[in-house]
Image (cartoon, helix red, strand yellow):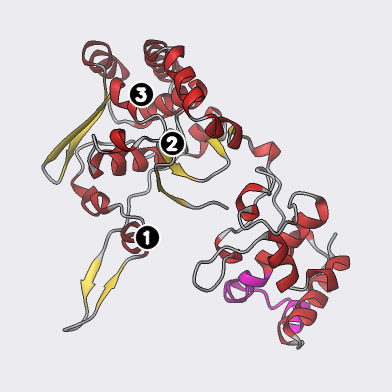
Amino acid sequence: MYNTGKRFYFLKKEIIAKYQDVHFDMLWYIMGLTNIHRIHTEDAMREFLIRYFLIRDKPIEEYAIDVINDELIIDGYISNQYFKITMYDLVQLMGFERSDFKYNIDGRLSDFIEEYQFKPINIKTQQTGDKSFTISSDALAYALMGLKTLFEIDSCSIPFLNTLEGVSRARVASASKLAAYVVNKIGEAEFERFRNEFPSAISRYFNWSLKENKVEFNVFEDMDRENLAKIYEIHDGNSLSANQLRNLEIDDDFKHDMNYLNSHIVFAYGVKKGYVKLSDNQLTLINDIEPNFSYDYDELLGPDGEMYSTQEIYDNFNMAAWMEYLP
Protein backbone atom coordinates (compact mmCIF):
# COMPACT_ATOMS: atom_id res chain seq x y z
CA MET A 1 0.00 0.00 0.00
CA TYR A 2 1.15 3.56 -0.58
CA ASN A 3 0.09 7.16 -0.08
CA THR A 4 -1.09 8.95 -3.18
CA GLY A 5 -1.15 12.69 -3.80
CA LYS A 6 0.98 15.39 -5.40
CA ARG A 7 4.55 15.28 -4.13
CA PHE A 8 7.16 17.96 -4.78
CA TYR A 9 10.19 16.73 -2.82
CA PHE A 10 12.37 16.56 -5.94
CA LEU A 11 11.23 19.86 -7.47
CA LYS A 12 12.94 23.13 -6.75
CA LYS A 13 10.76 25.97 -5.45
CA GLU A 14 11.47 28.14 -8.47
CA ILE A 15 10.24 25.35 -10.74
CA ILE A 16 7.03 24.86 -8.74
CA ALA A 17 6.35 28.60 -8.93
CA LYS A 18 6.43 28.51 -12.74
CA TYR A 19 3.39 26.25 -13.00
CA GLN A 20 -0.27 26.34 -12.01
CA ASP A 21 -2.42 23.80 -10.20
CA VAL A 22 -3.89 22.67 -13.52
CA HIS A 23 -0.47 21.44 -14.69
CA PHE A 24 0.24 19.45 -11.54
CA ASP A 25 -3.32 18.14 -11.19
CA MET A 26 -3.61 16.98 -14.79
CA LEU A 27 -0.15 15.42 -14.77
CA TRP A 28 -1.09 13.61 -11.54
CA TYR A 29 -4.34 12.44 -13.14
CA ILE A 30 -2.71 11.13 -16.32
CA MET A 31 0.07 9.42 -14.36
CA GLY A 32 -2.72 7.63 -12.51
CA LEU A 33 -4.33 6.49 -15.75
CA THR A 34 -0.99 5.13 -16.96
CA ASN A 35 0.11 3.52 -13.66
CA ILE A 36 3.26 5.63 -13.54
CA HIS A 37 4.39 7.18 -10.25
CA ARG A 38 7.52 9.06 -11.38
CA ILE A 39 9.11 10.07 -14.68
CA HIS A 40 12.65 10.90 -13.60
CA THR A 41 14.37 7.93 -15.31
CA GLU A 42 14.61 7.21 -19.01
CA ASP A 43 12.58 4.01 -18.62
CA ALA A 44 9.85 5.67 -16.58
CA MET A 45 9.56 8.65 -18.93
CA ARG A 46 9.43 6.38 -21.98
CA GLU A 47 6.83 4.08 -20.41
CA PHE A 48 4.69 7.03 -19.32
CA LEU A 49 4.69 8.43 -22.86
CA ILE A 50 3.94 5.08 -24.53
CA ARG A 51 0.97 4.46 -22.26
CA TYR A 52 -0.34 8.00 -22.62
CA PHE A 53 -0.09 7.90 -26.42
CA LEU A 54 -1.92 4.57 -26.40
CA ILE A 55 -4.87 5.57 -24.22
CA ARG A 56 -5.51 8.90 -25.97
CA ASP A 57 -8.42 8.64 -28.37
CA LYS A 58 -6.32 10.12 -31.13
CA PRO A 59 -4.34 8.63 -34.04
CA ILE A 60 -0.65 8.33 -33.24
CA GLU A 61 0.18 9.95 -36.58
CA GLU A 62 -1.65 13.14 -35.55
CA TYR A 63 0.12 13.04 -32.23
CA ALA A 64 3.47 12.75 -33.92
CA ILE A 65 2.84 16.01 -35.80
CA ASP A 66 2.18 17.86 -32.52
CA VAL A 67 5.21 16.33 -30.85
CA ILE A 68 7.69 16.79 -33.67
CA ASN A 69 6.57 20.24 -34.83
CA ASP A 70 5.62 21.87 -31.53
CA GLU A 71 7.15 19.55 -28.89
CA LEU A 72 3.61 19.38 -27.50
CA ILE A 73 2.88 16.39 -25.24
CA ILE A 74 -0.33 17.17 -23.34
CA ASP A 75 -2.78 19.95 -24.07
CA GLY A 76 -6.47 20.67 -23.74
CA TYR A 77 -9.13 22.64 -21.93
CA ILE A 78 -10.61 22.11 -18.52
CA SER A 79 -13.41 24.41 -17.39
CA ASN A 80 -12.57 26.65 -20.38
CA GLN A 81 -8.98 27.01 -19.16
CA TYR A 82 -6.34 26.01 -21.69
CA PHE A 83 -3.29 24.15 -20.45
CA LYS A 84 -0.36 22.46 -22.09
CA ILE A 85 2.67 20.43 -21.11
CA THR A 86 5.48 20.47 -23.63
CA MET A 87 8.67 18.48 -23.87
CA TYR A 88 10.43 21.33 -22.06
CA ASP A 89 7.84 21.17 -19.27
CA LEU A 90 8.34 17.42 -18.82
CA VAL A 91 12.02 18.11 -18.21
CA GLN A 92 11.18 20.85 -15.72
CA LEU A 93 8.67 18.61 -13.94
CA MET A 94 10.83 15.50 -13.98
CA GLY A 95 10.90 15.42 -10.17
CA PHE A 96 7.12 15.46 -9.76
CA GLU A 97 5.72 12.38 -7.99
CA ARG A 98 2.21 10.98 -8.00
CA SER A 99 2.70 8.96 -4.79
CA ASP A 100 5.27 7.46 -2.44
CA PHE A 101 5.02 4.05 -4.14
CA LYS A 102 8.40 2.33 -4.07
CA TYR A 103 8.40 1.78 -7.82
CA ASN A 104 8.28 4.27 -10.67
CA ILE A 105 6.47 1.97 -13.10
CA ASP A 106 3.64 -0.32 -12.07
CA GLY A 107 3.70 -3.47 -14.21
CA ARG A 108 4.88 -4.33 -17.69
CA LEU A 109 3.43 -2.64 -20.76
CA SER A 110 1.73 -5.92 -21.73
CA ASP A 111 0.01 -6.05 -18.32
CA PHE A 112 -1.09 -2.44 -18.68
CA ILE A 113 -2.57 -3.04 -22.12
CA GLU A 114 -4.45 -6.08 -20.86
CA GLU A 115 -5.78 -4.47 -17.67
CA TYR A 116 -6.35 -0.82 -18.63
CA GLN A 117 -9.91 0.37 -18.25
CA PHE A 118 -10.88 4.01 -18.13
CA LYS A 119 -12.86 4.79 -14.98
CA PRO A 120 -14.51 8.21 -14.84
CA ILE A 121 -14.02 10.13 -11.62
CA ASN A 122 -17.15 10.36 -9.50
CA ILE A 123 -17.22 14.02 -8.47
CA LYS A 124 -20.53 14.66 -6.78
CA THR A 125 -21.64 17.05 -4.07
CA GLN A 126 -25.25 17.54 -3.07
CA GLN A 127 -26.84 19.80 -0.50
CA THR A 128 -29.07 17.76 1.81
CA GLY A 129 -30.18 20.49 4.14
CA ASP A 130 -29.67 24.11 5.10
CA LYS A 131 -26.26 23.40 6.63
CA SER A 132 -25.40 19.94 5.38
CA PHE A 133 -24.40 18.26 2.14
CA THR A 134 -23.11 14.93 0.89
CA ILE A 135 -19.89 14.47 -1.04
CA SER A 136 -18.69 11.48 -3.08
CA SER A 137 -15.59 9.58 -1.93
CA ASP A 138 -13.63 10.74 -5.00
CA ALA A 139 -14.54 14.37 -4.37
CA LEU A 140 -13.58 14.10 -0.70
CA ALA A 141 -10.26 12.44 -1.51
CA TYR A 142 -9.35 15.01 -4.14
CA ALA A 143 -10.33 17.86 -1.84
CA LEU A 144 -8.07 16.51 0.90
CA MET A 145 -5.20 16.07 -1.58
CA GLY A 146 -5.56 19.58 -2.98
CA LEU A 147 -6.54 18.40 -6.47
CA LYS A 148 -9.13 21.10 -6.94
CA THR A 149 -8.76 21.20 -10.73
CA LEU A 150 -10.13 17.67 -10.94
CA PHE A 151 -13.48 18.84 -9.61
CA GLU A 152 -13.97 20.07 -13.19
CA ILE A 153 -12.63 16.93 -14.86
CA ASP A 154 -15.93 16.32 -16.68
CA SER A 155 -15.21 19.45 -18.71
CA CYS A 156 -11.76 18.22 -19.79
CA SER A 157 -11.40 18.16 -23.57
CA ILE A 158 -8.88 15.30 -23.66
CA PRO A 159 -10.66 12.09 -24.73
CA PHE A 160 -9.41 8.70 -23.53
CA LEU A 161 -10.14 5.22 -24.82
CA ASN A 162 -12.29 3.04 -22.57
CA THR A 163 -10.02 0.00 -22.97
CA LEU A 164 -7.03 -1.13 -25.00
CA GLU A 165 -8.70 -4.39 -25.92
CA GLY A 166 -7.79 -5.28 -29.49
CA VAL A 167 -5.16 -2.55 -29.79
CA SER A 168 -3.06 -3.23 -32.88
CA ARG A 169 0.62 -4.04 -32.84
CA ALA A 170 1.10 -1.18 -35.26
CA ARG A 171 -0.37 1.32 -32.78
CA VAL A 172 1.81 -0.02 -29.96
CA ALA A 173 4.87 0.15 -32.22
CA SER A 174 4.04 3.72 -33.28
CA ALA A 175 3.50 4.83 -29.67
CA SER A 176 6.79 3.22 -28.64
CA LYS A 177 8.65 4.86 -31.52
CA LEU A 178 7.22 8.30 -30.70
CA ALA A 179 8.02 7.91 -27.00
CA ALA A 180 11.59 6.91 -27.86
CA TYR A 181 11.86 10.00 -30.02
CA VAL A 182 10.81 12.24 -27.11
CA VAL A 183 13.19 10.59 -24.63
CA ASN A 184 16.07 10.87 -27.11
CA LYS A 185 15.16 14.49 -27.78
CA ILE A 186 15.20 15.24 -24.03
CA GLY A 187 18.64 13.68 -23.96
CA GLU A 188 20.58 11.59 -21.47
CA ALA A 189 22.21 14.72 -20.05
CA GLU A 190 18.92 15.90 -18.53
CA PHE A 191 18.38 12.60 -16.73
CA GLU A 192 21.98 12.68 -15.55
CA ARG A 193 21.47 16.23 -14.27
CA PHE A 194 18.48 15.06 -12.24
CA ARG A 195 20.42 12.10 -10.82
CA ASN A 196 23.17 14.44 -9.68
CA GLU A 197 20.77 16.96 -8.14
CA PHE A 198 18.57 14.40 -6.39
CA PRO A 199 20.57 11.20 -5.78
CA SER A 200 18.11 10.08 -3.08
CA ALA A 201 15.35 9.87 -5.70
CA ILE A 202 17.41 7.25 -7.49
CA SER A 203 18.49 5.28 -4.42
CA ARG A 204 15.08 5.34 -2.71
CA TYR A 205 12.93 4.07 -5.58
CA PHE A 206 13.01 1.22 -8.07
CA ASN A 207 12.00 1.34 -11.71
CA TRP A 208 9.72 -1.64 -12.29
CA SER A 209 7.08 -3.31 -10.13
CA LEU A 210 6.38 -6.70 -11.69
CA LYS A 211 3.49 -9.01 -10.84
CA GLU A 212 5.65 -12.06 -10.34
CA ASN A 213 7.81 -10.25 -7.78
CA LYS A 214 4.97 -9.03 -5.57
CA VAL A 215 4.39 -10.71 -2.23
CA GLU A 216 0.73 -10.69 -1.26
CA PHE A 217 -0.59 -12.42 1.84
CA ASN A 218 -4.33 -12.96 2.24
CA VAL A 219 -5.31 -14.08 5.74
CA PHE A 220 -8.46 -15.87 4.53
CA GLU A 221 -6.76 -17.70 1.68
CA ASP A 222 -3.22 -18.26 2.94
CA MET A 223 -3.75 -19.12 6.61
CA ASP A 224 -5.03 -22.15 8.44
CA ARG A 225 -8.54 -21.12 9.54
CA GLU A 226 -8.14 -22.36 13.09
CA ASN A 227 -4.85 -20.53 13.54
CA LEU A 228 -6.46 -17.34 12.30
CA ALA A 229 -9.32 -17.86 14.75
CA LYS A 230 -6.82 -18.21 17.60
CA ILE A 231 -5.23 -14.88 16.69
CA TYR A 232 -8.68 -13.29 16.70
CA GLU A 233 -9.30 -14.70 20.19
CA ILE A 234 -5.97 -13.52 21.54
CA HIS A 235 -6.39 -10.04 20.18
CA ASP A 236 -10.11 -9.50 20.79
CA GLY A 237 -10.25 -11.23 24.16
CA ASN A 238 -13.46 -13.00 23.12
CA SER A 239 -14.60 -15.68 20.70
CA LEU A 240 -17.21 -13.74 18.72
CA SER A 241 -15.19 -13.03 15.57
CA ALA A 242 -13.31 -16.32 15.93
CA ASN A 243 -16.54 -18.30 15.98
CA GLN A 244 -17.84 -16.44 12.96
CA LEU A 245 -14.69 -17.48 11.16
CA ARG A 246 -14.97 -21.09 12.31
CA ASN A 247 -18.60 -21.19 11.19
CA LEU A 248 -17.59 -19.85 7.77
CA GLU A 249 -19.72 -16.74 8.29
CA ILE A 250 -17.40 -14.70 6.11
CA ASP A 251 -19.20 -12.06 4.09
CA ASP A 252 -18.14 -8.61 2.94
CA ASP A 253 -19.31 -7.03 6.19
CA PHE A 254 -17.20 -9.42 8.22
CA LYS A 255 -14.15 -8.75 6.04
CA HIS A 256 -14.69 -5.04 6.42
CA ASP A 257 -15.03 -5.29 10.20
CA MET A 258 -11.87 -7.35 10.49
CA ASN A 259 -9.78 -5.39 7.99
CA TYR A 260 -7.97 -3.37 10.65
CA LEU A 261 -6.83 -6.47 12.53
CA ASN A 262 -6.16 -8.42 9.35
CA SER A 263 -3.92 -5.63 8.05
CA HIS A 264 -1.83 -5.99 11.19
CA ILE A 265 -1.70 -9.76 10.74
CA VAL A 266 -0.33 -9.18 7.23
CA PHE A 267 2.22 -6.81 8.76
CA ALA A 268 3.21 -9.49 11.30
CA TYR A 269 3.59 -12.02 8.47
CA GLY A 270 5.99 -9.55 6.83
CA VAL A 271 7.98 -9.36 10.06
CA LYS A 272 8.16 -13.15 10.34
CA LYS A 273 9.28 -13.59 6.73
CA GLY A 274 11.79 -10.75 6.84
CA TYR A 275 9.97 -8.33 4.58
CA VAL A 276 9.48 -5.87 7.46
CA LYS A 277 12.40 -4.66 9.54
CA LEU A 278 11.63 -3.79 13.16
CA SER A 279 13.06 -0.45 14.20
CA ASP A 280 12.24 2.49 16.46
CA ASN A 281 12.93 4.92 13.64
CA GLN A 282 9.73 6.87 12.93
CA LEU A 283 10.06 6.47 9.16
CA THR A 284 10.54 2.71 9.10
CA LEU A 285 6.94 2.15 8.00
CA ILE A 286 7.97 3.70 4.69
CA ASN A 287 11.69 3.03 4.41
CA ASP A 288 12.22 -0.38 6.03
CA ILE A 289 9.60 -2.54 4.33
CA GLU A 290 10.58 -4.48 1.23
CA PRO A 291 9.10 -2.68 -1.79
CA ASN A 292 7.59 -5.87 -3.23
CA PHE A 293 5.67 -6.66 -0.03
CA SER A 294 2.00 -5.60 -0.21
CA TYR A 295 0.53 -4.13 2.96
CA ASP A 296 -2.21 -1.66 3.89
CA TYR A 297 -0.35 1.48 4.88
CA ASP A 298 -3.47 3.43 5.92
CA GLU A 299 -4.67 0.75 8.36
CA LEU A 300 -1.32 0.85 10.15
CA LEU A 301 -1.59 4.55 10.95
CA GLY A 302 -2.91 5.92 14.22
CA PRO A 303 -6.48 7.29 14.69
CA ASP A 304 -5.37 10.79 13.69
CA GLY A 305 -3.18 9.61 10.83
CA GLU A 306 0.01 9.55 12.89
CA MET A 307 2.76 7.22 11.75
CA TYR A 308 4.19 4.67 14.18
CA SER A 309 7.53 2.95 13.85
CA THR A 310 7.48 -0.71 12.87
CA GLN A 311 8.62 -1.64 16.38
CA GLU A 312 5.75 0.32 17.94
CA ILE A 313 3.22 -1.39 15.66
CA TYR A 314 4.66 -4.78 16.57
CA ASP A 315 4.60 -4.05 20.31
CA ASN A 316 1.23 -2.28 20.40
CA PHE A 317 -0.45 -5.31 18.86
CA ASN A 318 1.48 -7.75 21.02
CA MET A 319 2.39 -9.69 17.90
CA ALA A 320 4.95 -11.80 19.71
CA ALA A 321 2.05 -13.52 21.53
CA TRP A 322 0.53 -14.90 18.33
CA MET A 323 3.42 -14.96 15.84
CA GLU A 324 3.58 -18.76 16.15
CA TYR A 325 0.18 -19.12 14.45
CA LEU A 326 1.40 -17.48 11.25
CA PRO A 327 2.65 -19.70 8.42
The answer to whether mark 2 and mark 1 are in CB contact below 8 A is no
Q: Look at discs 2 and 1 and give the one toward the viewer.
A: 2
The answer to which of 302 and 184 lies nearer the viewer is 302
Q: Residues in magenta?
A: 242-261
| Label 3 – label 2 distance at C-alpha | 12 Å
Vertical placement of 216 versus 14: above or below? below
Residue 47 or 323: which is nearer the viewer?
Answer: 323
- Give amino acid for label 1: Ala
Q: Main secondary structure of the magenta part?
A: helix
Image coordinates of residue 16 in percent, x first then y, are 30, 38
Give percent across and percent down for residue 145: 36, 56
| Distance of label 2 from label 1 (alpha carbons) | 23 Å
Earlier in the chain: of badge 2 and badge 1, it is 2
- Is residue 258 in the magenta section? yes
Q: Could you say whether the residue bearing mark 3 is in a helix, strand or loop?
A: helix
Q: Residues within 10 Å of mark 1 (few under 14, many from 20)?
A: some
Residue 34 versus residue 185 in the image, above or below: below
